[in-house]
Amino acid sequence: MKKYFWYIGVGAVLTVLALWCYNRWDIWFYNLPEPAYTAVQVPSRIVLTFGSCGENTRAVSWQCGDTVAASECLYTKISSGDTLRVEAEGKLFVTAGGRCVLYHAELDSLERGATYSYCVNTAGLSSDWQQFDLNANSDSLFSFVYVGDVQDKADGFSRQLLPEIAERFPTDFWIFAGDLIERPHDQYWNEFFVATQPFRMSVPITSCTGNHDYLKGIERRLEERFIYTFPYFLAEQHDNMAVYAMRYGDAAFIYLDTNRDFWHLYSQRQWLEQALKETQMAKWRIVVMHHPVFSIRHKNNNLLIRKAFQSLFAKYKVDLLLAGHEHAYARKTTRAKDGLQTTPVYVISQCSPKDYRINLQSGYDRYGLGNRFYQIVTIANDTLQFLTFTEKHELYDELLLIKSSDGSVLFEDKGIGMLEILNINLDRIAIDGEKRAKYEQIIQQRLNQ
């Protein structure tokens, strides 16, 4: 009889597991068909980013046609009278929706404080000339925009918001936390290029990888159009992972690829430790990764990522960890044994039209729901200013880090006590009925604290 009940129990468990896998199958393995597209036959979708050597190099990527052709980038330092040519590398992509060719070229040995003009040429067809500047004072002062998941729908709000940010805050460069696109389809790539049109050819754009930039499967695969849009990954790739490290002024920036299995994360840990060792002379160290170390959805989320990287962040005194993925805003500082604030500062942010439910008891100091957010980070010598704004460009959070000569950090946390934006928007989160009532009760409890 006991054996009979044991069989029933095992059968029940297997049935539940099978139903769970059935419900999750499409989430894990199904790639939506890419709608048909036709590649533009003139140089377009031009992106300026950093080159393989970081601050004093630039890379330019673009698309043109559906057949690889002779291509180059022409550039000149304003008032120099010399025009230089760099041969471009082209890569043909045959995707489910069509064919396209991506090109990239690197401009090196650039001078700080100089202004450069450039254009790209493919098969005798040239783009308009564009300009970019190199900050002459980057060792003492620079700023960047940080944006979490964009992941916008067609004709989405990012077309309005991202240009408004660029106009209000003319920073030195941009950082995205991955999930630039809803799916690796041409239509969504086009949405990102349209939204960044006013600034992507004159201000360097960088991004780490996000899960929506991957193709699903038993082993997920990064869609290569991402790599060739941000070609700095080509020079830095470690064990076929999209990782990148660069110096800018007195800060080191490290981009991780967290959309991988444990074995790849362990290999990436070795790369990360070497990158942190090589940047120990930098005053500030900033890590960009799609998945947060500490989840605001469930305490066991991203456990493998935490096991792989967390000890290194503490050991090498990383100052700021910028993440996305969980479609809300959250920020917390680390607490030392004596209760004082210390680094790293953990940030989760998002700029998507889609919200997730989160756990408001997950240990963060600040939360934000029902809104898009972006950050302006300014580094001036020993001071790092971190500002968070809403989609209406209202200041929502403020933190000041002041680094002493011994490497310790003083905090001025001006965000605590600010009005918290915590609400449910049915256009942004699919929640109703009893679930909504329970979630609203949790939000109200947070606001009453």
Image (spheres, helix red, strand yellow):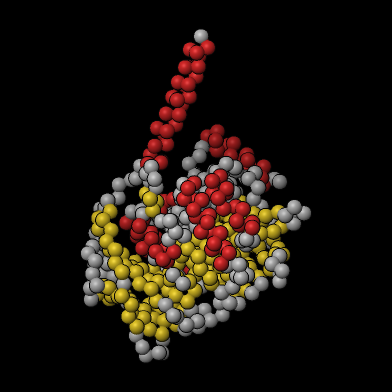
Name the image quarter holding residue 335. bottom right
* Residue depicted at 61% across the width and 57% down the height: 313
Residue 182's x, y, as percent? 40, 52
- In the rendered structure, the answer to whether residue 160 lies left or right of residue 42 reads right
Question: In the image, 297: left or right of 47?
Answer: right
Residue in the foreground of this view, choosing between 164 and 112? 112
> Compared to 280, does 152 lie above or below?
above
Which residue is pictured at 56% across the width and 80% down the height? 137
* Residue 432 visible within the image: yes
| Vertical order, 219 against 78 (above or below) | above
Residue 377's spot in the image, x, y percent? 58, 66
Residue displayed at 41% across by 90% down: 79
- The total of numbered circles placed on residues is 0
Q: Residue furthest right?
A: 338
Viewer-closest of 418 and 261: 261
Q: Is residue 50 left or right of residue 91?
A: right
Residue 140: x %, y % from top left: 60, 77
**Residue 323 in picture, x, y percent from top left:** 54, 55
Residue at left offset 42%, top offset 36%:
24
- Judge whether residue 392 can be spotted in this image: no
Q: Nearer the viewer, residue 321 or 181?
A: 321
